[in-house]
Image (tube, helix red, strand yellow):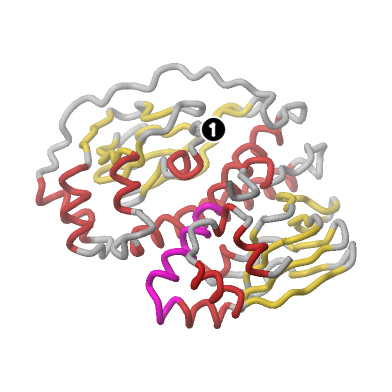
Amino acid sequence: MTTAETLKRLDLFAHFSEQQIGQLCGSAKQISHPAGARLVARDEVSREIYLLTEGSLRVCAMTPFGDFEFTRLGRGDLFGEVNFIDEHGRMGEVQALTDVELLVFSQSDLAALADLDPSFERALYWCFWKSLSAKLRAANMYLTRFFSPGVTAGSRTCTPSAAEAPTGNGGLDMAARRDLFREQRLPSMEINFLSSLSSEEAYEPGATIFREGDAGDKMYVIAKGQVMISKSVDGAGEEALSFLGRGDYFGEMSLIDKQPRSADAKAHPEEGAVVLGLRHEVVEQILDIDRLSSLRLLKILCRLVSERLRKLNEKLLGWHLVSGGGVEPPAPRVSDLSQREAV
């Protein structure tokens, strides 16, 4: 099978045009490694992107208590996109569990193609967003399984109670909405589109915006106050994953992978929060793959998910160290949560 045929069969690349697939192939080289080989080191400063085409890998960190696995990757999984986006060191060491074959995409080649062709850059970041969403959802699942080792994918049924209704108007006129999106340096057309089609929602301190297990029909951006993203973990209670402030987006994962919410979102217990809700129809229009104006927002979302993934992996590693390397469940496979072959 040619490189182009391999890429076309994977959902991650299903939105690429024939020309863009050809551009990708020109920036890729095929490599192979035997079982046990180390492909990249933790904290290594490199920005190549890898696509696993055959075999199995694990992403791990060396600790005084042995290796700690963040995740396992299978055929069709991508890694290295976080480093391409944020330019920081590798989150973990990548080791081959079996003999593996990969495509390696040159960072400099991809960056040059993106500079020359905004439509290619947009397709590339769409690919990143799909991959990052699956990884963050897998990491959220691992958080639950870390404290409840018997829980496996699909075995835990979440029956959420109803989220709390907004308390009323948060005092945002159209000018204030435009200012919020203007701060993110979005194009004028996107500013007007999002400002006019977003719904204002004000929440009292500690109020629940959505719960884990809810169907996701909106993405939100914070206008005032803060929002806590958290998860209820058996044996550990409520664990805060991140605190988000003005201009931060949340709730976007369910819109890309069409799966239920993977965590709770609550207004800050002291400040409360005012958010703008963007229904999935609005998000789909603004991020339409056939539009050029969506690139800035797409990059913001990719960077946000990258930051959350880094923070969550460091939290998991910290718990492993604090527990003295106590018993932990098998690391989740990203491929368990993502579609593999394009339909």
Position of residue 116 relative to residue 242, above or below, is below
Element at label 1 = strand
| Residue at x 81%, y 62% (from the top left corner) | 95
Can you identify the residue that label 1 sits on?
231
Q: Is residue 100 rendered to the left or right of residue 85?
A: right
Categorize mark 1 by other alpha carbons within 10 Å: few (<14), some (14-19), many (20+): many
| Residue at x 36%, y 30% (from the top left corner) | 209
Tell which residue pokes out farthest to the right in this image.
35
- Image coordinates of residue 64 in percent, x first then y, are 83, 55
Kind of residue indicated by mark 1: Lys
Position of residue 251 relative to residue 91, above or below, is above
**Range covered by the magenta-colored residues:** 114-131
**Quarter the N terminus occupies:** bottom right
Q: Is residue 9 magenta?
A: no
Q: Quadrant for residue 52, please give it.
A: bottom right
Position of residue 270 relative to residue 58, above or below, is above
- Image coordinates of residue 129 in percent, x first then y, are 49, 55
Q: Is residue 86 visible?
A: no
| Residue at x 62%, y 63% (from the top left corner) | 7
Q: Is residue 120 magenta?
A: yes
Report the number of discs. 1
Q: Quadrant for residue 163, please give it.
A: top left
Q: Pick whichever, 187 or 65, lies toward us.
A: 187
Task: Look at the magenta stretch and give its main secondary structure.
Answer: helix
